[in-house]
Image: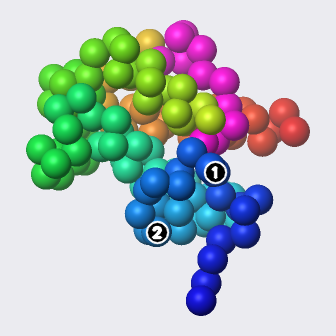
């Protein structure tokens, strides 16, 4: 029986599938940027206003507004969630020009790099 130690997971991810929790653990233990992408994509799909059941497939080029139906409130909720999961602060300026899942992932990865460089 394998379980993640409480300190290695984010309580905000508790409702997500095991694969997402494992990806988050890989990020925490190895700094795996690919794992960050898995967590970001899972969060984008979960918070999608059009409903996760309607989201068949997403890619880095999937647009938050046009393809997934996000509005400013839904984007804010998603960003607050990602800030909590990754223990980050994301300013509005950081999100300027973020239109796709790939751009959001890049923003998160940059913020994580800035955070680790400041530590």
Q: Residue at x 38, y 50 (%)?
A: 42
Q: Residue at x 61, y 66 (%)?
A: 26
Q: Is residue 100 above or below residue 72?
A: below
The residue located at (53%, 55%) in the rendering is 14
Query: Few, some or many C-alpha atoms within 10 Å of disc 1 (few <14, some 14-19, many ≥20)?
Result: some
Residue 10's label in the rendered image is 1
Whole-percent x and y of residue 100?
A: 30, 31
x and y percent of residue 18 in the render? 46, 68
Which image quadrant for residue 5?
bottom right
Instruction: In the rendered structure, find residue 85 and report the number of the disc placed on it.
Output: none
Residue 68 location (% of width, % of height): 19, 31
Q: Is residue 86 magenta?
A: yes
Mark 1–mark 2 contact, CB under 8 Å?
A: no
Spatial distance from mark 1 to mark 2, Cα to Cα? 13 Å
Q: SS class of the residue under badge 1?
A: loop
Q: Is residue 66 above or below residue 111?
A: above
The structure residue drawn at horizontal position 53% and vertical position 11%, both measured from the top left corner, is: 92
Magenta residue check for 51 = no
Tell me the residue that label 2 is attached to: 18
Q: The N terminus lies in which quarter of the figure?
A: bottom right
Q: Secondary structure at mark 2?
A: helix
Relative to 48, 97 lies left or right: right
Residue 94's image quarter?
top right
Q: Which residues are magenta?
A: 85-95
Q: Quadrant of residue 9?
A: bottom right
Using the image as rendered, state which of residue 23 and residue 118 is in the foreground: 23
Q: With 86 as the anchor, is 6 left or right in this view?
A: right
Q: Would you place residue 114 above or below residue 24 in this image?
A: above
Q: Along the horizontal axis of the image, is 115 left or right of 11?
A: right
- List the single residue furthest toward the bottom: 1
């Amino acid at each position: 029986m394998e379980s993640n130690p409480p300190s290695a997971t984010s309580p905000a991810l508790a409702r997500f599938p095991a694969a997402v929790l494992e990806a988050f653990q890989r990020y925490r233990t190895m700094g795996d940027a690919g794992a960050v992408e898995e967590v970001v994509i899972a969060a984008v799909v979960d918070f999608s206003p059009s409903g996760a059941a309607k989201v068949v497939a997403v890619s880095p080029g999937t647009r938050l507004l046009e393809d997934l139906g996000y509005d400013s409130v839904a984007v804010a909720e998603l960003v607050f969630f990602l800030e909590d999961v990754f223990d980050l602060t994301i300013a509005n300026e950081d999100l300027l020009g973020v239109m796709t899942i790939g751009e959001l992932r890049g923003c998160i990865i940059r913020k994580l790099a800035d955070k680790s460089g400041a530590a």
